[in-house]
Amino acid sequence: MGSRQRAAAIAVVQRELAGAKLPNVHNEERLKRLIEEFAAQPDKGLPQMFGDASQLEGAYRFLRNEHIDPDALLAAHASETKQRAAQARRVVVAHDTTAFVFGGERRELGRVVGKGRGFFGHFALAIDAATAMPLGVVHCEAVMRGDQVKSRKKVGPDDATNEALRWNRAARATHEMLQDAVHVMDREADSYALLAEMLERQQRFVVRLSQRERRAEGGPIGELLAGAPVVAEREVSLGARKAPPGPASRKRHPARHSRKATLEISAYQRAELLRPLTCGANYAPRIVINVVRVLEKEPPAGTDPVEWLLYTSLPVDTPDQILSVVDAYRQRWLIEEFFKALKTGCIYEQRQLESLHGLLVVLALSVPVAWHLLRLRTMVRTDPNAPAASMVSAAQIACLRHELGQRVLPPHPTTRDVLLAIARLGGHLRNNGDPGWLTLSRGFHDLKLLERGYQARGDQS
C-alpha cells in the first residue's frame, strides 16, 4: 500500500471510529495510533506494525484493557454506515456467520470446526443496491459455542442458549437502524421463528430455503413451487467454487467451474406455512409468505442445476418484482467477500492475542479496515474505467512500469489496469480471473517497497 493509499485508508478508518466512547483521552490517543498502523498495514502482525518496543507494548496494553469496549468501536462504525445508507435509494443488508479459528492456547475460546478453538462472528453488511457498493457493517455479534453438543429443542423467542437465534437478534437490531432495508440471508436462516418475527415487524426480506419439505397448506413447499409457471429468465455468470471441508458442507456447496447460466424464475404467491413441531407456541400457527424459485436451465452434462428457493415479504405480482427479489439475493455474495477481507486482507485469525476480549477489540478495529479494502476492490469492479489517479500516485505507476515493463500499463491506465498490475506483483496471473485478497495484499506490500526505493533515489539525486 503506497503513501497516498495509506493516508486515505488512515483518514477513512479514523473517521469511522471517531465517535467511539473510550474511558479517557490517553486511550483515544492510543486508538488513533493503532488505527494508523492497522489501516496502513492490515496484513502485518503487531510486532511488524510497531518497530519500537515501547509502542508495541502500548498497543498490547490497549488491546488487553478490559475498559475498552469493542461494542463501542463497532457502534461508531455502524453509526457512520447508517449515515451512508441514508443517502442510498435502496439498501440491502446481507446477514451471515463465519467461524474464526485460532491456533495455540487461547483463553475463553470455544468449539468451532474440527479441533480448532475460536468463536463465530455474525455480521450484517449494508450494501447500496443500485451500485453493489458496501456501505459498512451495521451489526456484529460474537457467538461462543460450548464444548457440549446441545440436543435439539423447541425454539422460543428468548432462549439465550440457542445460538440459532442470533439471526433473530441481528434482524431486530438492523431493522431498528435501517427500517426500509431489504434483509437477505442464506439457508442457515431458514427458520419459521425468524420469518414470523420479521413478518410481524413488517420487515422486507429475502431468505433462502433449506427445507423443501416444510409443511404448507396444500402440501410441502417444494412441491407447491414445482408447479409454478416460469415468468422470467435471466443470464448470469456463476463463479468457480472449491468444495468446502466436511461432507455436509460439500453436499450443500459442491465444487464447480465458472460458467454462464440461464436461470428460469417463477413465484408462488401467499403460501401458508404451518408452524413446525420444533417451534414454540409463542409463534403464530401459520404465516403467509411469498416464495420465488430460481432454476438453472440446461446445466452442463453431469452437473446439478443451480436452484434457489427464496422466501420473501416483497411483492411478486409482476416479472419485474420477481426479478427484483432475485437481484436482492444475489448481492448476498458481498458479505462472503467481506469475510475474506477480514481473514486474508487483515489476517485476523493470525492475531496473537491470548484472551477473547483482546481478540474482540482487534476485530472491532479490523472491521472498518476490511470494509475499506472491500470498498476499494468493489470500486474497481463497478467502475473499472475510472482514471488510475483515483487509486494510486504517479510515483506508484512509475514503479509498476519499471518493475513489470512499460507495456504492462497503457498510457492512460484505468483503476482495473492498476489493480491487475499490483496483483501481478503479488504473483497473480491474468488468465486466473480476478485477483484474490492474498495476491492483492502481497502486491500492495511489494509496491510499497518499490515506492520507498523510488523516493530514496529521488532524495539522493
Image (cartoon, rainbow, N blue to C red):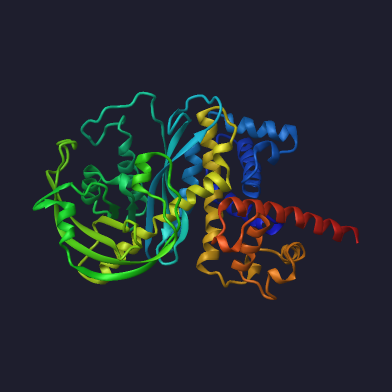
Instruction: Work out which residue is located at the far front of the displayed protein and give it.
Output: 301
Q: Is residue 117 left or right of residue 204?
A: right
Q: Nearer the viewer, residue 164 or 63?
A: 164
Q: Is residue 128 left or right of residue 373?
A: left
Q: Give how far across and how far down residue 113 sits, in percent.
A: 43, 34
Quick check: 323 above or below 456? below
Q: Give how far across and how far down residue 188 sits, in percent.
A: 32, 44
Residue at point 63%, 58% (across, down): 423
Report the quarter where the N terminus lies. Answer: bottom right
Quadrant of residue 3 within the rendered picture: bottom right
In this rendering, the count of numbered labels is 0
Report the quarter where the C terminus lies. Answer: bottom right
Instruction: Work out which residue is located at the far left of the displayed protein and give it.
Output: 218
Q: Is residue 384 left or right of residue 5?
A: left
Residue at point 17%, 52% (across, down): 221
Residue 382, visible in the rendered structure? yes
Q: Give how far across and how far down residue 10 sits, in percent.
A: 63, 51
Instruction: Work out which residue is located at the far right of the displayed protein and give it.
Output: 461
Q: Give how far across and how far down residue 444 sits, in percent.
A: 66, 54
Quick check: 454 above or below 246? below
